[in-house]
Amino acid sequence: MGHKKLIRFRAVDTFANVLQYPKNMPNNWHVFFKNNHPITLELACGKGEYSVGLGRVNQTNNYIGVDIKGNRIYNGAKISLEEGLTNVGFVRGQIDHLAEYFGEGEVNDIWIIFSDPFLRKPKNRLTHPRFLYIYQQVMKKGGVIKLKTDSKELYDFTLETIEEQGCSIVENIADIYGKGMAVGPLAIQTFYEKMHLADGRTIYYLSFTLPETTIVVPQRKAKMEIEDATEQ
């Protein structure tokens, strides 16, 4: 591990707004935030730029970035502390363990921002049924999952999954900048989004709700996919 990463890992250990593989947190996030405001997650948050951006503009919601890489979380956590964003927190942990960190119905919404499209391993995509099944365990009924991506493959895959699983589309924008729809929360730009835009890439946005029926994970691959979930 590089010296810079080591320094960041040690710093994250001291940050009050970061919990690493937290225990006894389901239904106790009101204690952490000292309020009962709705909770929004940013999954595979990286530097947490979206969590920070959302937290700046909406003080009536709590935002939690989730990522397995502590050295990435460092950036967003440090900025949040410096700016006094008490409604922004971070969890270092695995996405397939969300039900260990959050209680049933405790999560209001989920953002998935420029996540890895896993072109060779579709089962690792964060909109794959095995992950939707996990989200279903922690999200309130009617909670919205929001995907922002430059990957046409991930966008198309998610559309197919939505149809197969009986999810309901809330909003579908195939080119948010070309259609002048990059407003409000969609106007927040991460470092990578700015790079994608400089390269002339199209940015896609999908938001949808989960069905009332249980998400169906393809059975013939379910065992393999559950084992592979630890890669996230």
Image: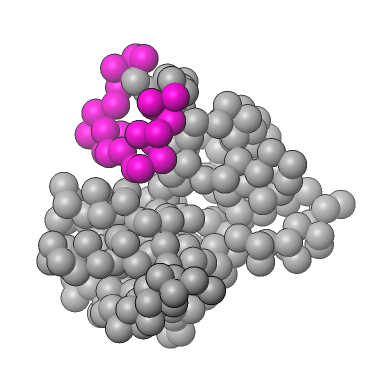
Identity of the residue drawn at 25% across and 67% down: 78
Residue 99 visible in image: no
Q: In the shown orientation, is residue 4 left or right of residue 225? A: left
Relative to 197, say whether 70 is above or below.
below
Task: Give coordinates of residue 94: x percent, y percent.
Answer: 55, 67
Residue 25: quadrant of the picture: bottom left
Q: Position of residue 58 (x, y in %)?
A: 17, 50
Q: Is residue 82 left or right of residue 62?
A: left
Residue at x-position 37% and y-position 56%: 47
User: Which residue is depicted at the point 43% across and 56% down?
Assistant: 46
Residue extending farthest to the top is 179
Placement of 23 over or under 80, stated as above or below: below
Residue at 49 percent across and 66 percent down: it is: 69
Q: Which residues are magenta?
A: 178-199
Of residues 156 and 37, the one nearer the viewer is 156
Q: Is residue 40 above or below residue 91?
A: above
Q: Nearer the viewer, residue 139 or 3?
A: 3
Q: Position of residue 77 (x, y in %)?
A: 29, 66
